[in-house]
Amino acid sequence: MANHTIHPSAIVDAAAELGDGVEIGPFCIVSGRVTLGAGVRLISHVTINGPTTIGDGTTLYPGVCIGMPPQDYKFKPGMATAGVVLGRDCLIREHVTIHAASKEPGQGPPTTLGDRVFMMVNSHAGHDSKIGNDVILVNGVLLAGHTEIGDKATLSGAVVVHQFARVGRLAFASGLSAVARDLPPFCIAAERNQMKGINAVGLRRSGMPREHITSLRAAFRQVFRVSRTRPEQIEVLRALGRDCPPVMEMADFVAGSKRGLLACAAAAADDESLE
């Protein structure tokens, strides 16, 4: 029998599976097919609906709601859902909401968070969203349905991301940004649908080699600060990316964009102070 602790005021469904060392605090409600990995902590007043899987070592703070039905008019009460999957060692702070997928199992993936995701107070992950590893969502970030956030991206306070929009790996969105199109990897978003430069501070902190950061700066200037068609952007990025994998990654992201990219003011200078 697993070694776990459940407060007397908590309600835990018999269908739930609890790993070793799970702690379920006061007034938590765990309903349906919920799997909590080893060392998961529900501090208090946490509500989880299945199907939901939460990886080892994740901590959920008071007021968190996970696995509630999607905010989608097409989804009716009682419909099946692929649910939610959270990775390992995530920090999910007060009053975060993570909604279940809008499709049933076999017809679409669950709403998914990777490992070591940090969602701060009042942030929201909408149905069918996909969040990578080591992502930081600061207080009040709102991710609409079907959004995709790449590994190690950081979205600052009160950033909003439109449904189906994508944010690339190691990208950064400054506070109060509105992102209704795709933000390429390694870039900075600011204001409303504006792209301001390369996330040089974040790239240095990640340990990216200096020569790759220099190549990304050059690629940004040659591709986004001038007027080019999408095929021209991809062609130039692929040429510049032959000796620089991050630039080639940017090219692949641009080629896969369906919503189009954030606008970039041609006269604007790279602004690391946004971080």
Image: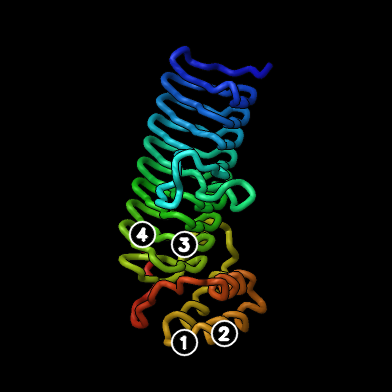
Helix, strand or loop under label 1? loop
Q: Nearer the viewer, mark 3 or mark 1?
A: 3
Helix, strand or loop under label 3? loop
Q: Earlier in the sequence, mark 3 or mark 1?
A: 3
Residue 36, horizontal then vertical, whole percent: 59, 30
Does residue 159 appear to the left or right of 69 in the view shown?
Answer: left
Q: Tell me how far mark 3 sits from mark 4, CA to CA.
A: 20 Å
- Which residue is the site of mark 4? 174
Nearer-the-camera pick, 260 or 68: 68
Q: Which mark is residue 236?
A: 2
Q: Earlier in the sequence, mark 3 or mark 4?
A: 3
Instruction: Inspect the image, locate mark 4, and give the three-letter code of the amino acid beneath it.
Output: Ser
Q: Nearer the viewer, mark 3 or mark 4?
A: 3
Residue drawn where x is 58% and y is 62% of the image: 208
Which quadrant of the figure contains the C terminus? bottom left
Residue drawn where x is 31% and y is 67% of the image: 192
Q: Which mark is residue 164?
A: 3
